[in-house]
Image (tube, rainbow, N blue to C red):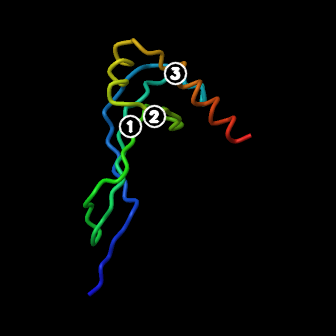
């Protein structure tokens, strides 16, 4: 009897537009999308158990984005948090890591 177990199958769910800003990476004015990606453990190619979950706000053109908590998405929609400042901070951190 063979047991086939797999890791890494991802399902991405799109919850729609959150805020319209100018993307610091591609310089397009776009509506950032709220996405939730879950990565699953599979048994015989059937997703059984999620082992990683990530919520992001991302540019629909270049896929640049930031990780967010569920509560942060509502605050950004209501205008309580500056999304552009968070995006520029994340872009700066990623370029510092590369160089």
Camera-side mark, 3 or 2: 2
Residue 13 left/right relative to 19: left
Q: Are marks 3 and 1 in contact (CB under 8 Å)?
A: no
Which mark's residue is nearer the viewer, 3 or 1? 1
Rendering coords of residue 47 (x, y %): 27, 61
Q: Which residue is at a point 69% across and 42% down the rendered structure image? A: 98
List the single residue furthest toward the bottom: 1
Q: Does label 3 or label 1 sit earlier along the sequence?
A: 3
Q: Earlier in the sequence, mark 1 or mark 2?
A: 1
Q: Where in the figure is residue 12, as x and y percent of width and height?
A: 35, 46
At x 53% / y 35%, what residue is drawn? 64
> Residue 98's mark?
none
Location of mark 2 (residue): 67
- What is the secondary structure assignment of the residue under circle 2? strand
Q: Which residue is mark 3?
A: 29
Label 1 sits on residue: 55
Picture coordinates of residue 95, whole percent (x, y): 67, 35
Residue contact between numbered discs 3 and 2, judged by CB atoms under 8 Å? no
Question: Percent x, y for residue 32?
Answer: 43, 27
The residue sitting at 33% across, 61% down in the picture is 41
Mark 1 and mark 2 residues within 8 Å of each other at the beta carbon: yes
Q: Quadrant of the N terminus?
A: bottom left
Horizontal side, residue 30 vs residue 26: left or right: left
């Amino acid at each position: 009897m063979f047991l086939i177990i797999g890791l890494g199958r991802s399902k991405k769910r799109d919850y729609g537009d959150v805020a319209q800003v100018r993307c610091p990476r591609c310089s397009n004015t776009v509506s950032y999308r709220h996405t939730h990606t879950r990565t699953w453990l599979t048994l015989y190619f059937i997703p059984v158990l999620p082992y990683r979950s990530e919520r992001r706000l991302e540019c629909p053109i270049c896929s640049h984005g930031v990780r967010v908590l569920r509560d942060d998405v509502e605050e950004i929609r209501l205008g309580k948090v500056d999304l552009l400042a968070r995006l520029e901070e994340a872009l700066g951190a990623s370029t510092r890591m590369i160089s």
